[in-house]
Amino acid sequence: MDNEYQYAKRIAEYIWAKCYKQESPKWKALPDLMGILSQIDNMVYGMNRVHPNQAMHSDA
């Protein structure tokens, strides 16, 4: 594997472990760089969306 893939994989695994491990415990990194970058993009987008429960509690 090339350095770019390994670097992106470490980033994706870190984001997954910090933010998605409980809701997606079987997640695995895709085997190519573009796949990993797509996963990172999706995870970052998911971190920015407001979950319904969070929206209810933010008005308090």
Image (tube, helix red, strand yellow):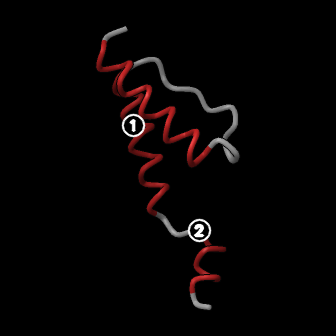
Chain-order first, disc 1 or disc 2: 1
30 is higher (above) or lower (below) than 20:
above
Horizontal and vertical percent position of residue 15: 49, 41
Q: Amino acid at mark 1?
A: Ser
Q: Which mark is residue 10?
A: none
- Residue placed under numbered mark 1 in the picture: 38
Task: Give the residue displayed 41% in from the left and 29% down from the top.
Answer: 36
Camera-side mark, 1 or 2: 2
Specify the quadrant of the image occupied by residue 45.
bottom left
Task: Give the residue displayed 31% in from the left and 11% down from the top.
Answer: 2
Horizontal and vertical percent position of residue 12: 46, 34
Horizontal and vertical percent position of residue 1: 37, 8
Horizontal and vertical percent position of residue 40: 41, 39
Task: Give the residue displayed 49% in from the left and 55% down from the top.
Answer: 46
Task: Give the residue displayed 38% in from the left and 18% down from the top.
Answer: 6
The C terminus - image quarter: bottom right
* Drawn side of residue 57 relative to residue 11, left or right: right
Foreground of the two, 41 or 16:
16
- Residue placed under numbered mark 2 in the picture: 51
Q: Amino acid at mark 2?
A: His
* Drawn side of residue 50 relative to residue 5, left or right: right
Q: Are marks 1 and 2 in contact (CB under 8 Å)?
A: no
43 is higher (above) or lower (below) than 5:
below
Foreground of the two, 17 or 30:
17
Secondary structure state at the residue bearing disc 2: loop
* Drawn side of residue 30 relative to residue 26, left or right: left
Q: Residues within 10 Å of mark 2 (few under 14, many from 20)?
A: few
* Drawn side of residue 31 relative to residue 24, left or right: left
